[in-house]
Structures are given as structure tokens and as C-alpha cells.
Image (cartoon, rainbow, N blue to C red):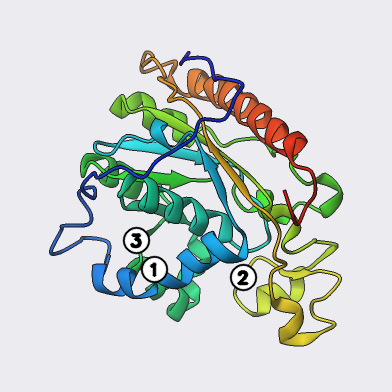
Amino acid sequence: MGVSESAEPIAIETPDAERGPAQGASTDPFGLDVEIRDLVAPAFRFLHDRYWRVEVTGAQHVPVEGPVLLVANHSGALPFDGAMIVTAVDVLRRRVVRFLYDRFVEAVSPLDAFYRKVGGVTACRENAQELLRMGEAVLLFPEGISGVAKPFSERYRLRPFSPGFARLAMQFDVPVVPAAVVGAEEIYPLVGRAEGVGKALGIPYLPITPFFPLLGLLGALPLPTKWFIRFGPPVRLAAGSAQGDYLQARNDAVVVRRRLQGMVTRLKNRRRSVFFG
């Protein structure tokens, strides 16, 4: 299933490729606003280049056009990992990535509107199917909320994957590109979760870190850790029978999770320190 990954990181140069299909679209069924996206892009580029100093390898594995699923480990209490993956692909492949976000965000209207304008889409099978039909690159996190909610003591240990992405890959015969992220686990060292307060605010939980809420808004600032993102070789999942699709997808999800866990572990073991790489 798929090809084996090289043990050594690959140096990447920015190609002179055109942006993917979403960039030139005048209208978008999910609300992408290219002008708003371009307006906020410098802020995310600052976080990528200067604040977290993200070092990216393997970007050539992300196709510059055509439908593809980007499957990543989830961490960091807040979804900055998704923002950095989107930024890395935009910079190195000149391609817009559509990311799926959890339904609870719909209850926070300003955040929901912002996510949509910068390329986000509410996570559900029908929306993911439509994005792939549109030829988009779709980023998802099969660990779901449990990925960002795990305690600091369990950082970089991937939670079980939902098989939904594997079913999509088989249905549309699209490649799955694993994306390993290291550095995000330490931006908010999670020591607890205030689930009652979170539900009152319309979110699954309120993260408790050594600095938040003790230091108020100052404690909400993410720490300037050193990040690494590694894109692995595409994985192709063979389509199964109608009766066996779910079982096959579940097995394939386990295989992809193991591959991604290996990538994350290797990246983590290579870094010299949390803040300086």
C-alpha cells in the first residue's frame, strides 16, 4: 500500500507553479473569499517563518493539482497545526488547501464565518465528497478533537483514526499524503480541561495550561517552539467491495496511522530541543 518513505529529509525549493483550482474561482459553494484569505495570509506567514520557524520537508509529495487528501496528526489545543500546514502548501506548492473543521465551530458565528472565508469547510462526508469532486486538496485530522485534547504527558502519541478518510480515498481513488507535525504539542502544554466551562461557551472544553487562565490573555499566547512538518509519499488505497469497504477502510486507517506515527516519532527524535530544533 503506497511507497516507502526515504529516511532522509529532502530539500525543497519553491516552484513557479500556478495556484490550485480554488485560487482562481470567482465563487465558492462553501464561502471561500480569496481577498480575505490573501489579507490574513501575511499574519500566518509570520507565524510560519518567524515565530515557529517551521522547517518543511517532503513538500514535493503534495500534487500541485487534482484531488488529494492530506492526513495529519492533530495537536496543540488550538488548530494552529492546520494553519501551518495550509501555509506551507501555499508557500511551497502555490496551492490552496481546504481544511475540515468540527461542527461545534458553527455555534461560534464569527469563528465559523472566518474559517469559511479562509477556506474551511464543516467536517462531514458530503462536504468532503464535494471538495474532492471539485478537485481540491483537502486537509483533515482523523484523530478529531481527541488529538488536541490529549494531556501533555501523552504528546506525539497518535489517537485512533476515524476510517472516514480511507473510505473517501477508496471512493474517489485519490492519493493520501500523510503530514507529520512536531512542535505544536508544546505551544500550549495541556495539563487539564475545563469541560463545563467549555460547554457553556459552546466549545468541547477550555484548555488549562501552566499559564492559562492563570495569566489571563497573556497566558493564551502560544509558546514560540520550533516546528517541523514532513509530508510523506502519497499512499494509494485500493477500492474494495461494497460489503467490505468499511472493514477495509478501518484496516487501512490503522496502516496510515502507523505510518504517520513513525514519521512523527522520527521528526521528534531528530530535534535537539523544543525551542531551537
Marks 1 and 3: in contact by CB < 8 Å? no
Give the crowd class for mark 1: few <14, some 14-19, many >=20 residues within 10 Å: some
Disc number for residue 41? 1
- Of the residues shown, which amino acid type is indicated by label 2? Ile
Residue 144: x %, y % from top left: 59, 48
| Residue 6, picture quadrant | top right
Residue 104: x %, y % from top left: 53, 66
Where 272 sits versus 199, above or below? above
Using residue 65 as the reference point, say whether residue 197 is left or right of it. right
Disc number for residue 138? none
- Of the residues shown, which amino acid type is indicated by label 1? Ala
| Circle 1 or circle 2, nearest the eye | 1
The residue located at (64%, 51%) in the rendering is 227
Q: Secondary structure at mark 3?
A: loop
Q: Please report whichever mark, 1 or 2, sits nearer to the chain's N-terminal start.
A: 1
Where 5 sits versus 141, above or below? above
Q: Please report whichever mark, 3 or 2, sits nearer to the chain's N-terminal start.
A: 3
Q: Secondary structure at mark 2?
A: loop
- Of the residues shown, which amino acid type is indicated by label 3? Gly
Using residue 119 as the reference point, say whether residue 218 is left or right of it. right
Disc number for residue 203? 2
Disc number for residue 119? 3
